[in-house]
Amino acid sequence: MKINRTLKLTLLLLFVMSGAGTASAYFAYQMGAQALEGVSQPEINPSKKLGKGTQKSTEPTEFKPIDEKTILIKVYDYTHKKNEAAATEKKQKSKNNQKEDKTSQSIDSNTQDLQTSQTVANLPLQVKDRGVKLEIEEAKNEGTSLSFKVNLQNQGLTPVRFLYSFLEVKDSQGRSLSAITEGLPQELPPNSDNFVGKVKIPRALVNDSQTLSFNLTDYPDQKLQLNIAQIPVIQ
């Protein structure tokens, strides 16, 4: 009889514990469901998206070196403007000094006469192609630059366009040099007048060269071949 009572108490205790556990699980489930209301699963797997982004960022990019001609032009522009500013300041100061050295003036005059005789002996040089004339009339030193006076004329019946970055200047060793044009038109109309401009080359680039060559073509057709060789370098 005593054993039956103990068994009944044990079964009752197990039933109560099982009911308590079931009730706890039910309330926990309800609280979790309420807490997650309004939360939805993302449409895209974040790990896949991150992996794709990482893959794109690690793709090698093409190395594009800066053109040497572009660097030389920028350096020349900077030094040229700086030298022009210094020359302007020097001219303003020289207005206050009226005395000039006659000996230096005589030497400069003789030097100019020598340069003029060299120019007359070798220049002008010209070439024609398809009715377009390119002429190099004279060469002289201007500050830190060697300057060439250039004439362009279109005697043909159709307009001709130029992109002066296509102007190729080489020294007697075949090395390409940086050059800047001034005053030359982008387009020559048919039966045009003579257009006058300049081609300037940094003096430091031509100190060890005796002659230069110019090669100019039209844009965008590139049918003209205006080539002038054996252009003297005035020292």
Image (cartoon, grey):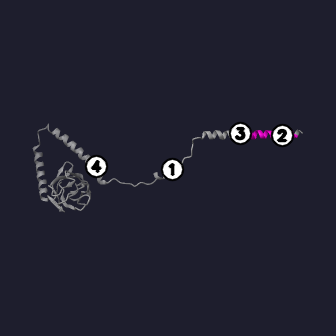
Q: Residues within 10 Å of mark 4 (few under 14, many from 20)?
A: few
Q: CA distance from mark 1 to mark 2?
A: 61 Å
Residue 62 position in % (x across, y down): 40, 55
Q: In this view of the protein, can residue 33 be seen by the observer?
A: yes
User: What kind of residue is marked 4?
Assistant: Lys
Left or right of 26 on screen, residue 160: left
Magenta-drawn segment:
3-20
- Residue at label 3? 23
**In which quadrant of the rendered view does residue 192 lie?**
bottom left
Q: Nearer the viewer, mark 3 or mark 4?
A: 3
Residue 166 position in % (x across, y down): 26, 57
- Residue at label 4? 74
Q: Residues within 10 Å of mark 2 (few under 14, many from 20)?
A: few
Q: CA distance from mark 3 to mark 4?
A: 83 Å
- Residue at label 2? 8
Q: CA distance from mark 3 to mark 2?
A: 22 Å
First in sequence, mark 2 or 4: give its number. Answer: 2
Q: In this view of the protein, can residue 202 be seen by the observer?
A: no
